[in-house]
Each structure stands twice: as structure tokens, then as C-alpha cells.
Amino acid sequence: MAIKRIGILYHPMIKAAYTLAKKLEKFLSSRGVSVWLCSAWEGEKARAQVNDTDLILTVGGDGTILRAAQTVVPRLTPITGINLGRLGFMTELSTDEAQAKLPALLAGEGWIDERAMLEAELCPPHQEHEPPRIFYALNDVVVARGAIARVIYVEASIDGEPLTTYKADGAIVATATGSTGYSLAVGGPILHPQAKEFLLLPILPHLSPAYPLVLPPTVVVKLRISTVHQATLSIDGHINLPLASGAIIAIKLSSNRTRFLRIHPETSFYGSLEQKLKGKQ
């Protein structure tokens, strides 16, 4: 794939991210590549420039990548992450090697790592007469209690068949990519990154089922919220919306995918897992 135009999305609250982004812009421009820069927090501005872009470079951490994934969907524009964060499960390059490895990427030496995404349809309570809203998640879809520390009730069904009602702080539906994030923190299993299965598990359940479920990619999960207080819908941790009692979120595997362009040799996910979980890269 000939790379002629690159977008650089940087973390706006890390000074070093903008500095590195400008340095990379200069380097790439000197090689005849058309480059645009944008804060990863300015999604609409970035989306307006993605159409004819061959590659997105992110400068930040995994959170910056999650925003980039939202920016490019439904396109298949690949993403290469440069890590300024701590863990960097999804990032590919360190700051030290970014400039050294870019010529190889430009020369077409990389490989594509494709990840599953979720599609979440939010249907507000009937009395509000609002149309459903669609969201896409690379990591997870979370329904949770709001600011008031009281449990909420989450009625879960799979393919229309009632499963259980969680009395909990909330529930998580996570992709394989998201299985090493919030889901892992509340006791979920780790899935291989390329797996299309996804997870359903409660957050701090109280006298209700606590087990996580690994679900096949063909099912639809519906979560109906019941609460006296306001709850919250969170998509990949950075799209956050209030939920009223009676709201229903239908979640399934999306036909969209996130594609990462990688340059390091494809090594065993399991061989590096413990190092990554310890944040040692």
C-alpha cells in the first residue's frame, strides 16, 4: 500500500505528544508525504480529514488510539500508535523508535492486525420519543451507576432470551481487545486479541450472578436499565451519556473493524502478556 497522506492524532494534554507530532510532521513532509495534525479530542475536525488518508499515527497511549478508532470508523484506515503512556497494549512504537521505523512503514513493510468492534444501539425510554443512537466500541460498552453510590438493576437478555437481572454497579460488554482493560479489572477473562467472541460481566454484583460470560460473535445482548437515580452509558471510556430508567442498549459484533498497521514481527501474544500487564513493555 502506497502511503501518500498521513494524519497525526496527538494527546492534547501531554506537551511531549504535540512536540513529537510536529517533529514527525516535519520528517514525513521532507519525504514527500502529505501530513495533517489534529488533537485526538477533536473528533469532528479529524473525521473531516480522514477520507483520503492512508494512515493514522497516534501520539499518546491506548486512550488516544481508542479515540482514533472512533474517528476512522466506518473506514478501514489503519492506525499505528506511538506510546507516551504506561501500558500501551495497542500502541506499536516507542518514542525512541518512531522516526527510525517510519521509513519501513512508508515502504510497505508492515502487516495488518485487525480487531473486532462492537455496535451498541441505545433506545431511550419510550416516553422520550427519541430515535435510537448507534455507537461503535473497540474496547467496551459499559452501563453503570451515576454519581450516587447506589446499585442499579440491569436486565440482561441474549438473543431475546432472559439471562438474569444484575443488581450491581453496572455491567460491561467487552471485545477481545477490551478484555485486558476494565473488564479484566473486575474479574473478566483475557481473550486473544484477534478473537471475535465478546464478554458480558457485572461490575461489583450484590446478591446476583457474578460470573463472566464469553459469548459467540453471532448473538445480540440487550441490557435494560432500571434505577431510581441516573445511570451512565460509557463507550470506550470517553463517550459518556446519562441513562434514564427504562433505557435499553442492544449490543452486537459490528461489521466494522479497527485495523492496526504494525512493523514489529508478529510475536506470541501470550509470551508478552505478563510484561504488558506489569506495564513493562
Image (tube, rainbow, N blue to C red):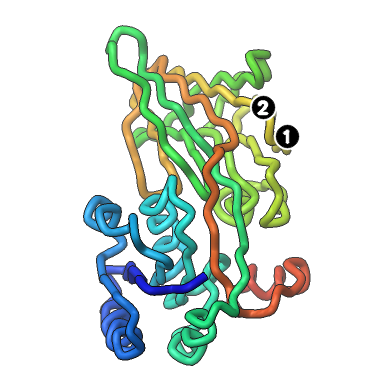
* CA distance separating discs 1 and 2: 6 Å
Q: Residue 227, position in %: x, y? A: 42, 20
**Mark 2 packing: few (<14 Cα in 10 Å), some, or many (20+)?**
some
Q: For residue 209, which quarter of the picture?
A: top right
Q: Is residue 40 left or right of residue 119?
A: left
Query: Looking at the picture, does residue 236 appear above or below residue 201?
Result: below
Can you say which quadrant of the picture contains the C terminus? bottom right
Query: Looking at the picture, does residue 49 appear above or below residue 159?
Result: below
Q: What residue do we see at 61% from left, 46% from top?
A: 175
Query: Looking at the picture, does residue 248 appear above or below residue 63?
Result: above
Q: Residue 215, position in %: x, y? A: 71, 34
Q: Is residue 109 left or right of residue 188?
A: left
Q: Label for residue 11? A: none
Amino acid at pointer 2: Val
- Name the residue at the front extreme: 2
Q: Is residue 268 left or right of residue 119?
A: right
Q: What residue do we see at 54% from left, 30% from top?
A: 251
SS class, disc 1? loop
Per the image, the residue denoted by label 1 is: 216
- Could you say which is closer to the camera, residue 25 or residue 165? 25
Q: Residue 232, position in %: x, y? A: 38, 34
Per the image, the residue denoted by label 2 is: 219
